[in-house]
Image (cartoon, coloured by chain):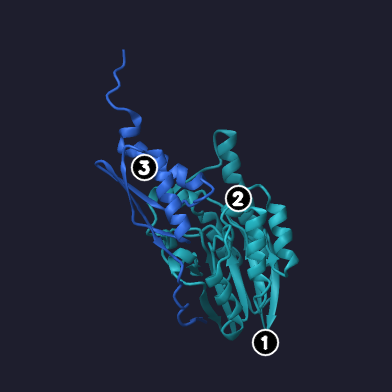
Chain colours: A cyan, B blue
C-alpha cells in the first residue's frame, strides 16, 4: 500500500504560510509522498518561490510537483523549477518519476496540462494561428502525458496535472469557463495509456470526484475546494 | 448618429468583467476564482481567498474599479485549514 498526500493551488504569496508549513511538516505520520498539483505560488516570483521552498524543504517525504498557470505568470519558470529542485522537489513537465515506497512502486507522470474544453464544447485546431497554437499546445502536452504513462513500469501509475481532464470535477465553476479549466485530450491520453488515479487542481469552485470516460478516477485537490492542506489517498 | 444610453461603467455585465480582470491581474490579489455580483448600486465579492490581506486588497481593488458602487466584501479566508480527513482507499 502506498499513501499519497495531494494538494494543488496552495498559492504561496509574499508572506509565510505557517498553517501550510505546519501541516506539511507533519506529513511523515500519514503519507509516503506529497503530490503538488500546480499553482504553488501566487504569480511565480522569486520571493514567493523562495518562501515555498522553505516550506517544502522541511517536508519529511518525497515531494513531486507540477506547475500551474499562476507559476508561469512572472515568466520566471526556469527559476521556479531550479529553486524547487534545489530543495529536493521533483518538478515534472511532460516527464515521469518512479517512487519506490515500502516495497511498492508508483510512477508519477506529470504535466501542467492546458485548456480547450470537453466533448461537444471544445476548441479545434482550426482557424487563426493563435487558436491553432492554443489547441496544439494542449495536444502536445496530452501526447507527452500518454507517452509518459505508457512508459511507466510500476505497480501503480498516477497522472499529476494542474488542469482537469474531465468536466465532472469542474462542476461548481461557471460552465462558460470550462474550456479554460481543462481538456478532454488529457483524459483521452490517460485512458489510452492507463492509470490508477488522476490528481489535478485549478478549479477552486469545482467538485472533488470524477472519472474519465475510460473509468480512471479523477480527484480535484484544489486547496480552496478541499478546505484543508491536503487530501490522502491509499493505493492498494 | 448612434446614441449612447449608458456609460459602460454602469452596465452590470461590464462592471463584473472589469472587476474580474482587475482581481486577476492586481499583484495584491491575483485570484481568478472570486465571484463578483453586481446588483443595483452594490457589488458583492464572494468565495475563498488565502489571507485577510488578500481579501482586504480584493475589496480595495473592486472599489477602485467602480468608485460609484458600494462594495460588499463577503470573501472567506482560508487561514485555518481543516484536518485532511481519512484517506480514500483506491484499489
Q: Position of residue A40 (x, y in %)?
A: 59, 61
| Badge 1 element | loop
Whole-angstrom CA distance, mark 2 to mark 1, is 36 Å
Work out whether residue B36 or residue A102 is closer to the camera in this orientation and state it.
B36
Q: Closer to us: mark 2 or mark 1?
A: 1
Q: Which mark is residue A139?
A: 2
Q: Chain of mark 3?
A: B
Residue B48, percent from left and from top? 41, 60
Query: Is the Cβ of the residue at disc 2 closer than 8 Å to that at disc 1?
Result: no
Where residue B16 is drawn, which disc sits there?
3
In the image, B39 versus B86, the foreground residue is B39
Marks 3 and 1 sit apart, C-alpha to C-alpha, by 52 Å
Tell me if I can see residue A120 in this picture: no
**Position of residue A151 in the picture relative to residue A223 (left or right):** right
Q: Residues within 10 Å of mark 3 (few under 14, many from 20)?
A: many
Disc 2 element: helix
Task: Locate residue B8 relative to residue A94 in the image: left or right.
Answer: left
For the residue pair A194 and A79, the one nearer the viewer reads as: A79
Which of A1 and A24 lies nearest the eye of the viewer? A24
Residue A18 shows up from this direction: yes
Residue at which label 1 appears: A102
Outermost residue on the left side: it is: B40
Vertical placement of residue A179 versus A187, above or below: above
The structure residue drawn at horizontal position 53% and vertical position 62%, both measured from the top left corner, is A9
Q: Measuring 66% from the left and 47% from the top, which residue is drawn there? A: A75
Amino acid at each position: 500500500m502506498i499513501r499519497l498526500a495531494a494538494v494543488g493551488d496552495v498559492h504561496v504569496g509574499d508572506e509565510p504560510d505557517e498553517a501550510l508549513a505546519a501541516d506539511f511538516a507533519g506529513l511523515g505520520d500519514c503519507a509516503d509522498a506529497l503530490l503538488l498539483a500546480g499553482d504553488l505560488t501566487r504569480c511565480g516570483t522569486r520571493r514567493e518561490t523562495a518562501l515555498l521552498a522553505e516550506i517544502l524543504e522541511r517536508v519529511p517525504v518525497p515531494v513531486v510537483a507540477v506547475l500551474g498557470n499562476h507559476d508561469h505568470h512572472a515568466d520566471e519558470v526556469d527559476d521556479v523549477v531550479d529553486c524547487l529542485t534545489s530543495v529536493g522537489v521533483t518538478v515534472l513537465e511532460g516527464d515521469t518519476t518512479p517512487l519506490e515506497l515500502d516495497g511498492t512502486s508508483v510512477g508519477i507522470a506529470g504535466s501542467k496540462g492546458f485548456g480547450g474544453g470537453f466533448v461537444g464544447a471544445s476548441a479545434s485546431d482550426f482557424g487563426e494561428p493563435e487558436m491553432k497554437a492554443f489547441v496544439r499546445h494542449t495536444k502536445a502536452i496530452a501526447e507527452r502525458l500518454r507517452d509518459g504513462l505508457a512508459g511507466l513500469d510500476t505497480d501503480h501509475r498516477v497522472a499529476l496535472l494542474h488542469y482537469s481532464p474531465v468536466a465532472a470535477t469542474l462542476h461548481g465553476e461557471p460552465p462558460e469557463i470550462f474550456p479554460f479549466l481543462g481538456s478532454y485530450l488529457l483524459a483521452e491520453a490517460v485512458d489510452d495509456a492507463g492509470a490508477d488515479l488522476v490528481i489535478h487542481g485549478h478549479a477552486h469552485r469545482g467538485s472533488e470526484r470524477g472519472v474519465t470516460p475510460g473509468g480512471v478516477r479523477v480527484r480535484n485537490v484544489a486547496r480552496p475546494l478541499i478546505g484543508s492542506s491536503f487530501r490522502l489517498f491509499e493505493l492498494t | 448618429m448612434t446614441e449612447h444610453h449608458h456609460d459602460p461603467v454602469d452596465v452590470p455585465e461590464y462592471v463584473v468583467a472589469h472587476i474580474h480582470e482587475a482581481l486577476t491581474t492586481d499583484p495584491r490579489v491575483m485570484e481568478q476564482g472570486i465571484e463578483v455580483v453586481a446588483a443595483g448600486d452594490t457589488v458583492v465579492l464572494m468565495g475563498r481567498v488565502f489571507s485577510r490581506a488578500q481579501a482586504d486588497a480584493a475589496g480595495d481593488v473592486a472599489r477602485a474599479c467602480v468608485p460609484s458602487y458600494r462594495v460588499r466584501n463577503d470573501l472567506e479566508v482560508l487561514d485555518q485549514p481543516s484536518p485532511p480527513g481519512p484517506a480514500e482507499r483506491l484499489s
